[in-house]
Structure formats: C-alpha cells, structure tokens
Amino acid sequence: MEFRELRSLVALAESNSLTLTAEKLHLSPGAIHRQLKTLEQELGVRLYEKVGGRLRLTQATELMLPYLKELMAQYDSALAALEEWRGMRRGLVRIGAGPTLSSYILPELLKRFRRIHPSVELTVETGNTPVLLEELGKGALDLALLVSSDLIEGPAFSIEASWEFELVLVSHRRHSPSHCRVAQLKSQPFILFRKGSRLEEPIDRYFAAAGFQPRVIMRFDSAEAIKAMIRTGLGISMLPMWIVDEDLRNERLFLIRQEDPPLRSKIALVGRKSAFIPQTVRAFVAEARNIRWKAPRLISRAARAQVAATDE
C-alpha cells in the first residue's frame, strides 16, 4: 500500500471524478485508475463504482475515509513542521557548559540567539570538560562552551568560535598592594579554583613559569564562592576579567596591577565534526561568531580608574 494511492482515493472522494482527481494531483486519469485498482487488490474490496454514468464510493471507502483524511492531515502537518524547521522557526540546539561559563558567558549567547530565533528550543547541560566532551562526542550535545588555554581540537571536535580574555589579580584593598610582581605576593593567602579545573590550569602554568608557588588556603568550584571569600578579606585570587568586572566597577573588589606579562586564555565554542550539522546549530555558531564581547575584555575602564587613583 503506497501513500500516493491513499492520497488519490481521498482526492477522488472529494471530486467524484477521475478526471478532476488527475488534474488535482497532476497525473493522468489512467495513472489514477491504475493506483486505485492496485489499492483495491491489496485491500480486497471495491473502492468505487459507476451508477448511471456517475461515480459513487462504496461502503468500504466511506468507512475508511475519515481515517484517511486524518492521515492526510497528519502528513501535511509533518511537512509544514519540516518547512518551519528549515525556515528556522522551529528546531533544537543542545549546549553544554561548565558552571562558571553558564553563569557569566552563556546567558548573553542564548539571549542574542533567542532574540533572532525565538521559536528554536535551547537546552543547556552543565558539567566538567571531560563529561561535556564525552556527551558532545556521543551526539548528546550539539555544542560545548569551554575554557581552555590550549584549545581542544582533534579528529572528533572543531573550534567553531573563540574569544580571548585576561585573568587578573584581585583582592580586598586593605590586605594587598595596588601593583606588584607576582613573586612579591608570597605572603598573601590565595583562594583559587579547584585543581584540575579549566580555569585553574592556565593559572597554575602562569605561576610555574614565574617561579612562584602561591600559598593556597582555599579552593572552590564556584567563582561566586571565591569572590565572596575575597570580599571578606580572607585572601586574594586570580580570576577572569569577565567574572570580576562588575565587582571592580562597584568597588567590591580591587585590582592588583601585575608588573609581569599578563595572563590570557580563551573561551571556545566547540562542535562535533560531522558530515551533517543541523541548520539550527549552524545558525547558533554564526551568531556566536558575530559577538564582540564588551566582557571579557583586557582591562575595564573601572579597573584603570582604580589603578590611576592609587598611583596618584
């Protein structure tokens, strides 16, 4: 039983004419006749007959007709949904990100994309980098937003977009100098990210290259927890500018200007290498590539003002 045969039968029921049915479906009357005869053979019933020169549907056809019309309607709805998806009115993008990026960077990405494609569904999964890459590799995620100084790229993954940012030293002003070399902070207690986290890796390498071993008194998974501890005066930290920018503007935290070379890392939007990338995912990547962040940025205006005021 072919779908085209069922469609011809529904069209015949509406027109009561083989000629009109053929015109509607852009086929010949002979082709319609052959389709209906094939359908009769498969079903084992007569579908129509001629009475007094007029075509009339059989009781078997009248019995099936409501179900066939519903089937045609469902088919049309399915095609319409597909066209909407092609036209970016529907679809799905599944994104993974770590807790920090989910709080600070991802919301702006989602907001900008949703503004352009309001009907595309966005789902977010949080986790550490190995878990997110595993989910991405399995196809459970379409994209992953990650922090990495050595961008993750290989046979399975591709970097779709990336943004550079600076990590800066911050403190509660009462307990630290306004500017210095990292090596001069030996006596300062440090509050850093958990060992092995993507934000901690570039910091560890940076300190090692400077021959500096920080006196770490606390480690956290959460940037908010680190900032809360710094604001109480328990220690200092090295954090991305996009995490502390608002705190610097509001003078809840204060910048320690580094006399060493600055530490920079990158945020990467990572995708899976595949022969087929859904249009919705391609659109999300395109929007991400268009973003020029106000934050993360190298040094905020507020931070510069803090440093200038201290130097005067």
Image (tube, grey):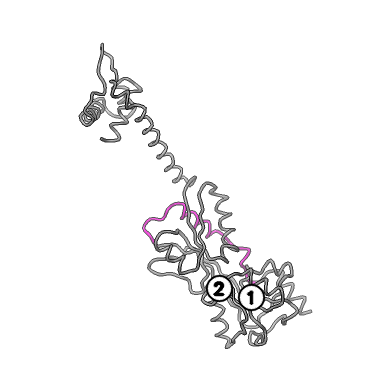
Against 148, residue 180 (above or below) is below
Residue at the right extreme, as displayed: 312
Q: Secondary structure at mark 1?
A: strand
Between residues 235 and 250, which one lies in front from this camera angle?
Answer: 235
Q: Is residue 197 left or right of residue 17?
A: right
**Residue 64's quadrant in the figure?**
top left
Amino acid residing under circle 2:
Leu
Q: Which residue is mark 2?
A: 199
Picture residue at 50% right of the left edge, 68% below the top? 128
Where residue 311 appears, x then y in whole percent? 76, 80
Task: Indicate left or right for 243 with 98 as reference.
Answer: right
Kindly report the distance in space between the C-alpha atoms of the residues bearing marks 1 and 2: 12 Å
Relative to 207, 82 lies left or right: left
- The part of the image, by quadrant, that contains residue 47 is top left
Under circle 2, the secondary element is: loop
Image quarter (top left, top right, bottom left or bottom right) of the N terminus: top left
* Residue drawn 53% across the image and 59% down it: 288
Q: Quadrant of the C terminus?
A: bottom right
* In the image, residue 219 above or below residue 52: below
| Rendered image quadrant of residue 297 | bottom right
Q: Is residue 281 magenta?
A: yes
Q: Which residues are magenta?
A: 273-298
Left or right of residue 51: residue 258: right
**How many residues crowd around disc 2 within 10 Å: few (fewer than 14), some, or many (20 or more)?**
many
**Residue bearing the label numbered 1:** 168
User: Height in image: 211 above or below 50?
Assistant: below
Q: Residue at x 28, y 14 (%)?
A: 54
Whether residue 74 appears in magenta in the rendering, the answer is no
Give, as a three-letter code, the residue at label 1: Val
Residue 70: image location, x then y, percent: 38, 32
